[in-house]
Amino acid sequence: MADPSDTNARPGGRPRDPHIDAAVLAATLGLLDEVGYTNVSLEEVARRAGTSRPAIYRRWSNRPALVLAAIGSRLDVPTAPDTGCTLCDIGDSFNIFLAAYRTIRPDAYIALYSECVRDPELQQRYVQTVVEPSRDAVRETLRRAVDRGDLRDDVDVEQLLDVIASLAHYRVLFGQHLSDDEAEKVIETLLQGAAVDYAALLAHSEALEREHFDSSGAHHVSTTHT
Amino acid sequence: MADPSDTNARPGGRPRDPHIDAAVLAATLGLLDEVGYTNVSLEEVARRAGTSRPAIYRRWSNRPALVLAAIGSRLDVPTAPDTGCTLCDIGDSFNIFLAAYRTIRPDAYIALYSECVRDPELQQRYVQTVVEPSRDAVRETLRRAVDRGDLRDDVDVEQLLDVIASLAHYRVLFGQHLSDDEAEKVIETLLQGAAVDYAALLAHSEALEREHFDSSGAHHVSTTHT
Amino acid sequence: MADPSDTNARPGGRPRDPHIDAAVLAATLGLLDEVGYTNVSLEEVARRAGTSRPAIYRRWSNRPALVLAAIGSRLDVPTAPDTGCTLCDIGDSFNIFLAAYRTIRPDAYIALYSECVRDPELQQRYVQTVVEPSRDAVRETLRRAVDRGDLRDDVDVEQLLDVIASLAHYRVLFGQHLSDDEAEKVIETLLQGAAVDYAALLAHSEALEREHFDSSGAHHVSTTHT
Amino acid sequence: MADPSDTNARPGGRPRDPHIDAAVLAATLGLLDEVGYTNVSLEEVARRAGTSRPAIYRRWSNRPALVLAAIGSRLDVPTAPDTGCTLCDIGDSFNIFLAAYRTIRPDAYIALYSECVRDPELQQRYVQTVVEPSRDAVRETLRRAVDRGDLRDDVDVEQLLDVIASLAHYRVLFGQHLSDDEAEKVIETLLQGAAVDYAALLAHSEALEREHFDSSGAHHVSTTHT
DNA sequence: TGCTAAGCGAGACGGTACGTCCCGTCTTAAT
DNA sequence: ATTAAGACGGGACGTACCGTCTCGCTTAGCA
């Protein structure tokens, strides 16, 4: 995943110097921390790693691939908490997503991802490296909650995952990290629901739709509601 | 907002040629559509607009500022729907957020934003140009729902907004646009709640916490749960 | 000559601020001394003179015109020495030509002249400002020597002037200023002649020419000489 | 000399494309002929040569270095004539110096040299490329004349060279090329001498000096002369 | 153990685009 | 009417970096 086995189906010839791999990854991370993704130039990485640009290109096909590998080498795999307190565990989900942002400067992810997007394979690797591990952990938490009967068993876990993950990312993206209190409140809303009476809303919606369907063409949509 | 009034509080001096403004914005949008944000070079923009790089720099301080202005000039301000059907209106919220992605290629936003992030002022302008207008429209929808009594009045509208907006962005980001069906399901969860019995969960959580507090120092946290 | 009367046939309107003239010339000379002709930018001149570029252009049509005026304002008109010693006076000629180079850095002249060359009028003004005054002084010296009977009266004074002036310039140009001793030796050669027997050389030359003319076509040019 | 071997003591690395060298030199000469030194922009040279600016900078460190190389590639090395007629050979010296000005537009030399002056190494290369070859040829002519006994053997050949070279340059510089007739007259003066009686002039000068020395302090310099 | 060739390291290349300096001109307001 | 001064449109600069090519050396595997 993080190792440069990309282009490494090598039968014979001179073997690669493994010190270069390590030095390059370290230089990349250092530079990334200091100047941000956009300003990581392979030129400078090579300089710091005491090697040359082609040596890097031989290992990683391009800048995003390199940086992704470097980030992957630093990120550690999160594990799902299991405190017995469903509410606490779910509340902790946000922290799991946010952990990655405490390891690597947040803006790096956006910039990196913005380049990965252009290459399907790279994008997939990004997801596998950065996104999936956290989701796996949270997914387990949610599954457990469903299993315990704490969450409704018709809940689409994957979708709930999306909601939580996206909110975490969104807030980091726009500069306002989610506080624990806010996280708690969001969880409350998600679990309790925002509607006073969802069933009523649904009924009303269906009634309207039916009415609209009946009077097709005519525009006398009566907007009666509670 | 989109016009280059940045540096334009001019008492004397030769006035700017407005044709250049228009030509540059048009060239920028064209290039953006064709090659994506990363490959928009001011060199080429200038070439297509039939002007010079300095003329662009005089109007916009850098590439993200230019592209942001160009995008702003194309994006039109969304308005909140008011069909009388609360569920429909809220369901439409996703579309409002997604509209921006149908006007400009999605990857452009990520790449652009990843550069805006580095400059607080630019970031703010990004938010004002790209993010806020949609949020304003959706906020109105949600407010109206609360006013009607369709949503609980202790709901934090801003937070709900975040949840909806973030999900929309997240899915676009990772390449899987939200279908109408999915949107409907998400709304259902949000409004109805995911928990079987939220009150019970809360009570349990608090019980655990109390217990933990009582036995301070001792680490015999009994993980009793259903 | 030095004053900016170039473009100044002004009947009415707002009068020019004479302080600007002086400030600009001073700024030009200062800059010229510091950074050399090539690096004198009107931008910087205007800045130092506390005025604007158009104000300069209004007075002098371009950079060489300005610098020429500035140099002219510093150069003072040389006068012919008259010590009674013909040899000394002529020897002093070199000093007269070199004086200009001690007032303004030599490389400035070359660079300035290289731009003046492109405009006949400017070139003429350069000659009038920089070249002629010195030549006038030396011409007087030479005339006096002829009048006294110290120089042969079939000597072409203007040509002798060229020889002396050109040597002075040439040596400055190529970085080796003429020492007094060298000057003395050159004068000696010029006055005494380099040939052992000029008449013989002339006769031989004419003989050869005649011979060559006679045997037109045939190539038996006998190279007999002393 | 003319080739860009400046920075080319290369052990490893990709070799330079020699076509670019040739194309750039040709483009430079073409441009030089058309628009003059000052208006030779590396931008345009690169455009015409079908290459890029950095490729030029890699070969020549700056504009004067490039143009000098280009000129050097066109100039051919002059050889000393040896017609047996000393007078003719010497008369031809002017033509040797002027030949360079018939190959490349004269103003280019001034402008080029004015930029070379600022860099000692460049200036030296200018001299080697443009000045020395002609001087070498003429030096040989003069040496031969001395050897033959046609010129006095106490004549400083190098100085005589300076006089001839400087006059040639001076006249070109100031726009009046030396005609053959004028050249002949100058040679006559140089060889025959301008003074009626040089020995007398010298004696008088020395007498004056002695007198001045005797009456040190006292200023009764009697200006007696013939 | 010696030979061959694959593949390595590093240097330099050709080229794109950058952000800036400065030019010469136009415009407005003031005199 | 003409100035002073600000700002404009644009040409060119010198540089950073990209992705690639070339070289000479190292080393594994076959003889």
Image (cartoon, coloured by chain):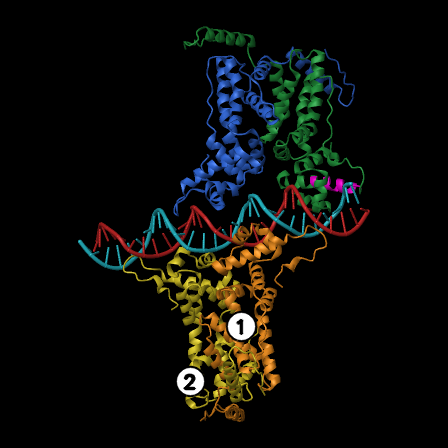
Chain colours: A yellow, B orange, C green, D blue, E red, F cyan
Residue A108 spot, x, y in % from top left: 50, 66
Q: D64 and A159: which one is in front? A: A159
Which residue corresponds to mark 2? Answer: A143
* Residue at the disc numbered 1: B97
- For mark 1, does the 10 Å Cα neighbourhood hold few (<14), some (14 to 19), or many (20 or more) residues? many
- The residue sitting at 73% across, 31% down in the picture is C1
The mark total stands at: 2
Q: Which mark is residue A173?
A: none
The answer to whether one can see residue C11 in this image is yes
SS of the residue at dot 1? helix
Question: For the residue marked with disc 1, what is the amino acid?
Answer: Phe
Residue nearest the viewer, comparing C191 with C37: C37
**Residue C110: x percent and y percent?**
61, 33
Q: Is residue C98 above or below residue A44?
A: above
Disc 2 packing (10 Å; few <14; some 14–19; many ≥20) = some
Q: Main secondary structure of the magenta part?
A: helix
Chain ID, mark 2 = A
Q: Residue at x 43, y 37 (%)?
A: D22
Magenta stretch: includes residue C99: no
In the rendered view, does C102 fall on the left or right side of A214?
right
Q: Nearer the viewer, mark 2 or mark 1?
A: 1
Q: Residue at x 57, y 55 (%)?
A: B24
Q: Is residue C26 magenta?
A: yes
Q: Are marks 2 and 1 on the same chain?
A: no
Is A118 placed above or below B166 here? above
D52 left or right, relative to D194: left
Residue A77 visible in rendering: no
**Residue C154: % across, % down:** 65, 11
Viewer-side residue, D60 vs D206: D60
Q: Which residues are magenta?
A: C15-28
Element type at marker 2? helix
